[in-house]
Amino acid sequence: MSTATTKKSTPALARVDPAVLYISVTLAALFVAWGVFFTGHIAAVAESTLNRIIDSFGWLFVLTSSGFVLLAVVLAFSRFGSIRLGKDAERPEFSTASWVAMMFSAGMGIGLMFYGASEPIMHMSSPPPGSAEAGSADAARLALEYSYFHWAIHPWAMYAVAGLALAYFGFRKSGNSLISSAFRPLLGGLVDGPLGKSIDILAIFATLFGSAVSLGLGALQVNRGLTELWGVPGSTALAVSIIAVLTVLFVISALSGVHRGIQWLSNGNMILAAVLLLFVFVVGPTVFILESQTEALGGYLASLPKMSFTTGAFGGGEWLSGWTIFYWAWWISWTPFVGTFIARISRGRTIREFIVGVIVAPSLVSVVWFAILGGTALNQQMHGADLASAVAQGEEAGLFATLQHLPWFSVTSVLVIVLVGLFFVSGADAASVVLGMLSCRGSTSPGRPVVILWGALTGLVAAVLLMAGGLQAVKQVAIIAAFPFLFVMIGLCASLVKALRAEPTGTPEPAREQARAAGADDRAMGAPEPEPETETEPEPEPESEPEPEPKQGPGVVPTEALADSQPAS
């Protein structure tokens, strides 16, 4: 069945889940109205709510984030690692390079541009209490270690667990792309009722506000770039205008589908990002970058267990909540979006290949990113440049302040603005498609009106948060939106483990493939087909036959249609 046939037989409006879409859109619209008409009130409520969450449940963010890492490692190297996300004969849809590029662009592209130079400088100026003297060489080393901690293994383990659950239930169990469908082993038929719809609504809100954080960061950095290059005065009004323009662009990209807009933009992002990193590496303090990366990476890996379970109970809680807990909440708010998107592009990979690819490859990119941009910024700060003062005026200034001390500032600044814009578009268009999928019964081809609607609402929420209190308000709402979804993530892990334990313990896949290949060779030489064996002993358990192709239902699109998934008109 072709994509066109699927669209004709299943109109866009017929795929919409009215309860999920209308409730989600209504609540999002009310939030926007609240922010527009009661700007001061929304900021006060967000601050008080955040304080309650951090004081009472900060430890839970710390504990669960490390739990996700441990679960991912266990699944990758257990007997479940050879299970394929799809039928046994399926193979990956995208090349490994495109797969990693799309993951990285969707997962944290804008954030790395925003914090790549500024976070190490801020950690050096204000390290964790009791760890090192502010501004010292030890503080500089710790700055890189904590940057790796916040951007490498832990966030990608969260994405890996969420994406694995969705890919497993969606492709191997012939389900759909809804978060709620992954709860069937735990909830049974309840996932088709109000409880399942509530899970999907929570996923929509986590995605909506998590994406809005990144859009806000991107707008602030583009704003700063215009100021540095052409003296355009920075203002909230300009940032909102930037969001409006880029929102139109990412909606257009989202409507072109995964294979066209999102894949092309992601590949382009990675090429331009590599050019920027290579330039800074060559003209910057090359030897210092290599030395600091080696030392900081070793320190990060050695201190990982201690860093992973620090809750601030014996001091340093304020620093922890402003950095580590904010990051864990931000990544959790992105798990339904990035998890759904990674699942969508990972059909045909094994669980081991999926987890190793999702965690290791982007983590290495994050380490190299901070080593080059963050290492260069730290070196400049240690040799007399006052980057700390620039970052204190606005975190978005860190990268531009670093590039000012290198050749060709005008050229590299334009490149940064273009990169931020592309990361903005590639991340947000993927988010709008995922929001459409979640509100259209998990369909991989949500209707164009739905995608446009969610794209507009995402831009509006980002604009409202900037007007309500700038970057601080953006961070606060990200944690608040992520808190209820944290419990969804815990349930998702339990459901995945329960389903995997029910998998048959038959012949490992490599042996099955060799047997199939040998059988094909025998048949080619004229050997008769072997007679099917009858089961005479209860052990070993016979290999189960591949499941028959499911009938098409809401949200289930045939494999051929996935080759060109794009919003339906």
Image: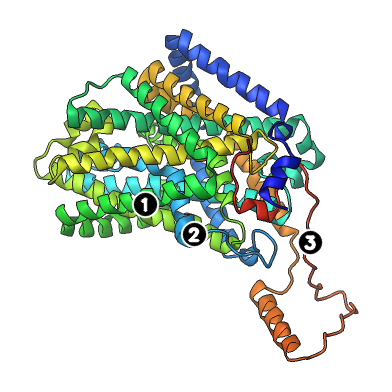
Which of label 2 and label 3 is nearer to you? 3
Numbered disc 2: secondary structure: helix
Query: Quadrant location of the C terminus?
Result: top right
Q: Which mark is residue 547?
A: 3
First in sequence: mark 1 or mark 3? 1
Mark 2 in CB contact with mark 3 (< 8 angstroms): no
- Side (left or right) of 127 relative to 174: left
What amino acid type is highlighted by mark number 2? Gly
Task: Tell me if 130 is positioned left or right of 76 in this view.
Answer: left
CA gap between label 1 and label 3 equals 38 Å
Place of residue 62 in the rendered image (x, y in percent of width and height, measured from the top left): 48, 41
58 above or below 166? above
Residue holding disc 1? 270
On the image, which quarter does residue 126 sit in? top left
Tell me the residue that label 2 is attached to: 357
Q: Which residue is drawn at 32% across and 57% down?
A: 297
How is this picture coloured?
Answer: rainbow
Q: Which residue is drawn at 23% across and 32% down?
A: 391
Q: Earlier in the sequence, mark 2 or mark 1?
A: 1
Rendering coords of residue 252 (x, y %): 48, 35
Mark 1 residue crowding within 10 angstroms, few (<14) / some (14–19) / many (20+)? many
Question: Front-most of 427 and 308?
Answer: 427
The answer to whether the residue labelled 2 contacts the one labelled 1, judged by CB atoms less than 8 Å apart, is no
Nearer to us in this view, 70 or 166: 166
Q: How many marks?
A: 3
- Residue 140 horizontal/vertical position (percent): 22, 46
Which amino acid lies under the numbered mark 1 shown in the image of this protein?
A: Met
Name the mark nearer the viewer: 2 or 1: 1
